[in-house]
Amino acid sequence: MAQRSEIGDTVMSAGSSEQMWQRVRTRLRAAVGEDVFTSWFARLELEEVVGDLAHLSVPTRFLCSWIQSNYLEKILEALSAENEAIGRVHVTVRVNGQARPRLASPCEASSGEKEAPSPATQPAVTMAASQPTLIAPANANRSDALSGSALDRKLTFDTFVTGGANEMALGVAKQVASAAANNIVTFNPVYIHSSVGLGKTHLLNAIAWAAGANDSSRNIVYLTADHFMYHFITAVKHQSALAFKEWLRRIDLLLIDDMQFLQGKSATEFGHTLSSLISGTKQVVVAGDAPPRDLEMLDDRVKSRLSGGLVIPISPFDAELRRAIVQKRADQACSRFSGLSFPPAVIDFVARCIVSHGRDLDGAVNRLVAANQLTGEPITVGLAEKTLQDLIRSRETPKVRIEDILKIVARHYKVPRTELLSSRRSRDVVRPRQIAMYLAKSLTSRSLPEIGRRFGGRDHTTVLHSVRKVEQLMSQDVDLTQEIELLRRMLEE
């Protein structure tokens, strides 16, 4: 039954508001698609409905700002469809599981309209709301400063397992961290590249932890390419780009991850930042999934800057390194769970059968531990065969990258790769581009939004249309089906 607050607003009962919110979530999922819903709405919760105001909450400031900037009107539309009385939406950040008071949050809007902050206050608000940095407030201890969402406490040099494939990368990372901690710049910039799951993110996190361990005054910033783009776009939108650039240029150590996703004007801004930091003798470390020359989204000047530093590849893991990783993770698990045991035969089996990348090896150990703890069954080769079927099967299919697809399709159809990423709509470009998107969806684990970003920053709906279009054509054209099967075999060889 509805209640009355002190100010006379009608408060929706908990039961009815929960039922309504589940219907709103269903509407949002249908409107934006499963991928977008999972990325941005899965952790959005309804706190209460008071009068015409719906109070929502999310766990992080980044998510709060992003939803407010991009999806507030869509949320309000879904809420109004379920309850015509709702005309305003208010988003706050949950702290320790509790939503902040409605009037205390910087993430707020009503009726889908956002009042523009004054120029005098906006830069400070923007930076406070979005920096995933290691910079600590004056009254914060160092551990608090390092516990931001951008860093993982488990990813340190102590937990990194070394072998022939990554020995050089680890050595350089340690040297950079030691030099940065002493205000010294060594190799600059450092660019680490490999396919997914081979330790790039681990090394960048480890550098940040080691470089900032003993000096809270150091401005150390770790950003993924997605976060870098978000900060830049937000700054431009709120007319605080100058403050954003000044903030970047005060950094002592900048670590950028997933460089392959950087694109558009954000990539240009990164190029300016890179030049500025290097000229100011500030250390820059970048990680990507391909050498600088193969990063299609970057202009030649940025590629040249990255190539002019120290470029370090990480090779696929050999059997010896895979076994060392499994043994290390197994030892860590045994130290946490009393009575747990990983026989050498199981270690050998996992290292021999899972050849994809380090994350799958970690996942295999975690699954075996979970199976043991949940069922009480001892960890044996038989349990591993049963529990790790999908991971073992994945070794039969070679890893295909979007860069490989672009190269093969461009060569086969005699279309420059830059044209596949461009906005050209001529038939000789559109059809190969659609086929490339279809192959990317079929042969890689990338989501539709990720594929869209790799194809010139396109929307996920464009990728979905291309996939469905190619599937329709293949059902009608045997020659096209055989042609695409040929491309598939070329990529999987």
Image (tube, rainbow, N blue to C red):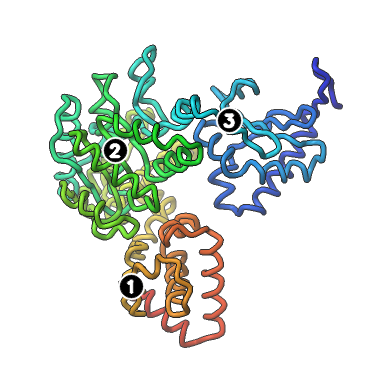
Q: Amino acid at mark 3?
A: Cys
Residue 419 appears in which quarter of the rendering?
bottom left
Q: CA distance from mark 2 to mark 3?
A: 27 Å
Mark on residue 107? 3
For the view shown, which residue lies furthest in the top direction? 139
Q: Earlier in the sequence, mark 2 or mark 1?
A: 2
From the top left corner, tell me how far across and down residue 168 is, in percent.
14, 45
Circle nearer the viewer, 2 or 1: 1
Residue 416 disc label: 1
Cα separation between marks 3 and 1: 44 Å
Instruction: Determine the residue positioned at 34% across, 53% down.
Output: 260
Q: Earlier in the sequence, mark 2 or mark 3?
A: 3
Q: Is residue 162 above or below residue 178?
A: below
Residue drawn at x 20%, y 31% is 177
* Circle 2: element type: strand
Callout 2 environment at 10 Å: few (<14), some (14 to 19), or many (20+)?
many
Q: On the picture, is 185 further left or further right than 284?
A: left
Rendered position, 205 above or below 492: above
Residue at image coords 29%, 26%: 219
Tag 2: residue type? Leu
> Could you tell me the amino acid type at mark 1?
Pro
Q: Quadrant of the C terminus?
A: bottom left
Sort mark 1 into few (<14), some (14-19) or many (20+) by Cα contacts within 10 Å: some
Tell me, yes or no, whether the two marked residues, 2 and 3, touch with CB atoms within 8 Å: no
Q: Position of residue 326 (x, y in %)?
A: 28, 44
Q: How many marks?
A: 3
Q: Is residue 138 at least partly visible in the picture?
A: yes
Q: Which residue is mark 2?
A: 255
**Residue 339: x, y in percent?**
37, 30
Q: CA distance from mark 2 to mark 1?
A: 32 Å
Is label 2 or label 3 in front?
3
